[in-house]
Image: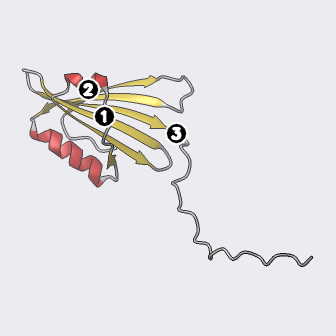
Amino acid sequence: MPVVKGTIQGKYDDVVGDGRSPFWYLTVTGVDASSYDKAEQLLLNAGFSRDQGRDDHDLQSCGRHSEFTKLAAEYYDITLCGNDTGSGYQLKYNVFLIHDAGPTPVPPPTLPPFEPTPPFPN
């Protein structure tokens, strides 16, 4: 997962306790407000998709926020939060990862049109 350059501090939490669903909380300081746009673009360039429509009450303290997801061998759910703290700009990445999320979905095969069988003779 790409992260903008700056001073990075992180915290790890295994919420479920099984090692399969970890959370990472990353805080990046030593950046300016333009780093938010760079962070979004890095995630998009790495194949993450914007997740529109989530209304996370924890994001009320964010000056700007975006949500991203990516399904591969693992499922990533990322919330990006940007704030001017008064002592500088700060980015926070909340990263939720599910290991063994399953294979990337494959579309079903194309089948020939259905042709009904003729009725059985009496």
| Residue name at image x 53 percent, y 60 percent | 106
Residue 95 x/y as whole percent: 37, 33
Please name the amino acid that badge 3 sits on.
His
Mark toward the viewer: 3 or 1: 1
Mark 1 Cα-neighbour bin, 10 Å: few <14, some 14–19, many ≥20: some
Quarter holding residue 55:
top left
What type is the residue that disc 2 sits on?
Answer: Leu
Asked whether, in this view, residue 94 is left or right of residue 104, the answer is left
Asked if marks 1 and 2 touch (Cβ < 8 Å), the reply is yes
Mark 2 near mark 3, Cβ–Cβ under 8 Å?
no
Q: Considering the image in quadrants, where does the N terminus appear?
A: top left
* Of 12 and 113, the residue lying toward us: 113
SS under mark 1:
strand
Q: Find residue 87 and report its horizontal and vertical position in percent.
A: 7, 21
Q: Which of 68 and 36 is in front in this view?
A: 68
Residue 31 to residue 109: above or below:
above
Q: What separation in Å lies between label 3 and label 1 (alpha carbons)?
A: 18 Å
Q: How far apart are marks 2 and 3 (CA)?
A: 25 Å
* Residue 59: assigned label: 2
Q: Mark 3 points at which residue?
A: 99
Q: Describe residue 54's horizontal placement relative to residue 107 as left or right.
A: left
Identify residue for label 1.
79
State the residue at coordinates (56%, 47%): 102
Residue 104's place in the image compared with 84, above or below, is below
Q: Earlier in the sequence, mark 2 or mark 3?
A: 2
Q: Which of 121 and 92 is in front in this view?
A: 121
> On the picture, is 49 further left or further right than 17?
left
Considering every residue shown, the one lying at the far front of the view is 122
Query: In the rendered view of the protein, which quadrant contains the C terminus?
Result: bottom right
- Looking at the rendered image, the disc whose residue lies closer to the viewer, 2 or 3, is 2
Tell me if mark 2 has few (under 14), some (14-19) or many (20+) residues whose alpha carbon lies within 10 angstroms of its own: some
- What whole-number distance in Å separates the C-alpha atoms at marks 1 and 2? 9 Å
